[in-house]
Image (tube, helix red, strand yellow):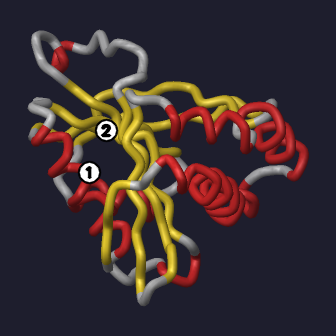
Amino acid sequence: VEVRQATLEEAGLIADLSRSTFLDTFAKDNTAEDMDIFMNEQFTRESLLQQVLDDKDIFLLAFLNGQTVGYARITDRSEPRTEEIFKNKSYIELARIYVIQSAKRKGVGSALLNKSLKIAKNLKHDIIWLGVWEKNPDAIQFYKAFGFQEFNKHKFLLGNDPQTDLLLHKYL
């Protein structure tokens, strides 16, 4: 697995990969109506292109046998954290890691996460944090295997469905 930082020229690829992997990951567990609302209002190709162009966002691409198979987004744009663990600490959010179905369980997610952790350390952050849907046990187990610990929960609106994300953190 090869992982590298994406270029601005790859914004379209990232936007399309973001939408397709999100659908593949969550469509089976949500209504078509909620998925349509989310994809057409909150997760549009245009909004994703803007994220790639934002200098507070870092996108990574993963390749397996020359094929693009996943991506990650690290961002400094997230809302300020007020929990005690963040007091007087520098932190960054791991906003997304997605891998195409055919490449899952082949080390792609691990490679993306390891590169994300390295970048966060190089940027001199103390903590990396993320949100993961409470009904995604594989992802929760994956992050906990890397030493992430739950510190809170928050609501995530998918279409009209308020869902609960577990918030996890890891000291770097």
Query: Foreground: 73 or 130?
Result: 73
- Decide if residue 107 is on the left or right side of residue 136: left
Q: Decide: few, some or many residues near mark 2? Use Cα within 10 Å; few <14, some 14-19, many ≥20.
A: many
Pointer 2: what residue?
A: 168
Q: Image point 31% across, 75% down: which residue?
A: 2
Q: Amino acid at mark 2?
A: Leu
- Name the disc covering residue 116, or none: 1
Where in the figure is residue 30, as x and y percent of width and height?
76, 51
Q: Image point 23% across, 58% down: which residue?
A: 115
Upstream in sequence: badge 2 or badge 1: 1
| Quarter in which the N terminus is drawn | bottom left
Q: Amino acid at mark 1?
A: Ser
- Decide if residue 1 is on the left or right side of residue 23: left
Query: Foreground: 114 or 15?
Result: 15
Q: Does residue 94 sit above or below 11 in this rendering?
A: above
- Name the disc covering residue 31, or none: none
Spatial separation of the CA atoms under disc 2 and disc 1: 15 Å
Image marks 2 and 1: residues in contact by CB distance under 8 Å: no
Q: Does residue 8 sit above or below 78 in this rendering?
A: below
| Quarter in which the C terminus is drawn | top left
Q: Image point 52% across, 40% down: which residue?
A: 52
Where in the figure is residue 161, as x and y percent of width and height?
75, 34
Q: Which is closer to the viewer, label 2 or label 1?
A: 1
Residue that lies at the very extreme toward the front in this rendered image:
9
Residue that lies at the very extreme toward the right in this rendered image:
33
Where in the figure is residue 86, as x and y percent of width and height?
19, 18
Element type at marker 1? helix
Query: Which of the 4 image quarters holds residue 130?
Result: top left
Q: Decide: few, some or many residues near mark 1? Use Cα within 10 Å; few <14, some 14-19, many ≥20.
A: many
Query: Foreground: 170 or 121?
Result: 121
Element type at marker 2? strand
Query: Which of the 4 image quarters holds residue 127?
Result: top left
